[in-house]
Structures are given as structure tokens and as C-alpha cells.
Image: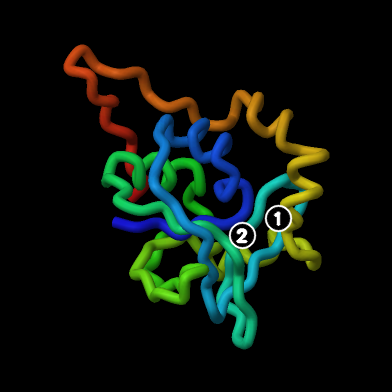
């Protein structure tokens, strides 16, 4: 599957820290959605928003195990949905992304998430955060252990 990400996950170091993997990727954007900063947090959330678009990255050929790690990183406040994104090369790609559940929208700040602010003010602490999931250790067979999936 392909996964469209926004917020901190567009940064390769964050994606590797969360998933323990690297994937082929391409810049893309999603029409009809906007990303905002989460109140009292360094990261972003995506919500439906007519006439807006969100810049992000589409990661290609993401396995279910890694998708489960991304679900855990997003947490229960988010749901994973199917979307169509447009790449920089103007190709349409089917992907999945995480959007903030309607009941959680009170957690949104009024300003959009800002990558430059994140990189300069928050990224180092974010990457060192003990609450950031650590990819599971490899098993003896060389595969990662199965993640815990949210219901």
C-alpha cells in the first residue's frame, strides 16, 4: 500500500525513527484537506477542509506491519482512510492517510503546522522523546516483531 503523510512524518529521520524503515517516496499533495498544529503538541493533524490542499509525501509499497506502526504513532485520535493524492509529476496515486477524528477537533490550534518551526524548535526533542514509539527489535529470523494494532 501507499501511505500519504504530512506533519513530522514528511521528514525522513522521523519516519525512520517511527517505523525503523525507509521507503521510496515522492512529494505529493492532497486536495480537500488542511493540516493544523495540535494544541500543546509539536505535530500536525489533518481534517477535511473544502478548497484547501495539504502538501506531504507519499511513501510507496508500505507493508502492513509498518502501517500498524504508523497507526500506533497516530493513536486512537486518528483514523486511517483511503485517499487519492497528486504527485509532483502530476500523477494520481491511491494511498492511505490518517485524519483526526471529528470528536477530537477541539485539539486543533488555529494556525497551520509549520515544518520550518518544527525543524528549528521541536525536532531534536521530538526525536529523543521517550513517548515516541521505538521500532520493535528484529526477531531471530530477521523480521521485525508484529506491532500491536489499534481496534
- Outermost bottom residue: 51
Q: Position of residue 135 (x, y in %)?
A: 42, 27
Q: Position of residue 69 (x, y in %)?
A: 40, 40
Label 2: how many residues lie within 10 Å, few (<14), some (14-19) or many (20+)? Answer: many
Q: Is residue 92 above or below residue 73?
A: below
> Which disc, if any, is residue 59?
none
The reply, left or right, for residue 85 in relation to residue 127 is left
Label 1: how many residues lie within 10 Å, few (<14), some (14-19) or many (20+)? Answer: many
Q: Residue at x 56, y 47 (%)?
A: 9
State how many labels appear: 2
Q: Residue at x 75, y 64 (%)?
A: 112
Q: Judging from the image, what secondary structure is the residue with disc 2 in? A: strand
Q: Residue at x 69, y 59 (%)?
A: 107
Q: Is residue 146 above or below residue 151?
A: above
Q: Position of residue 3 (x, y in %)?
A: 40, 56
The reply, left or right, for residue 98 in relation to residue 50 is left
Which of the 4 image quadrants contains residue 54?
bottom right
Which of the 4 image quadrants contains residue 33?
bottom right
The reply, left or right, for residue 146 in relation to residue 129 is left
Q: Nearer the viewer, residue 66 or 108?
A: 66
> Which disc, if any, is residue 45?
2
Check whether the beta carbons of the residues at disc 2 and disc 1 lie within 8 A of each other: yes
Q: Is residue 51 visible?
A: yes
> Which disc, if any, is residue 38?
1
Q: Nearer the viewer, residue 89 or 72?
A: 89
CA distance separating discs 2 and 1: 6 Å
- Outermost top residue: 140
Q: Earlier in the sequence, mark 2 or mark 1?
A: 1
The reply, left or right, for residue 137 in relation to residue 10 is left
Q: Residue at x 58, y 70 (%)?
A: 47
Q: Judging from the image, what secondary structure is the residue with disc 1 in? A: loop
Amino acid at each position: 500500500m501507499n501511505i500519504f503523510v504530512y506533519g513530522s512524518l514528511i521528514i525522513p529521520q522521523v519516519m525512520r525513527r517511527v517505523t525503523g524503515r525507509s521507503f521510496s517516496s515522492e512529494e505529493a499533495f492532497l486536495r480537500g484537506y488542511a493540516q493544523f498544529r495540535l494544541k500543546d503538541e509539536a505535530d500536525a493533524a489533518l481534517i477535511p477542509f473544502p478548497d484547501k490542499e495539504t502538501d506531504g509525501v507519499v511513501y510507496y509499497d508500505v507493508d502492513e506491519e509498518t502501517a500498524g506502526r504508523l497507526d500506533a504513532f497516530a493513536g486512537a485520535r486518528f483514523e486511517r482512510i483511503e485517499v487519492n493524492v497528486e504527485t509532483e509529476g502530476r500523477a494520481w496515486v491511491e494511498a492511505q492517510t490518517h485524519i483526526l477524528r471529528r470528536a477530537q477537533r477541539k485539539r486543533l490550534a488555529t494556525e497551520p503546522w509549520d515544518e520550518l518551526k518544527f525543524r528549528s524548535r521541536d525536532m531534536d526533542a521530538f526525536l529523543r522523546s521517550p513517548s515516541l514509539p521505538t521500532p520493535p527489535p528484529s526477531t531471530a529470523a530477521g523480521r521485525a516483531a508484529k506491532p500491536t494494532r489499534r481496534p
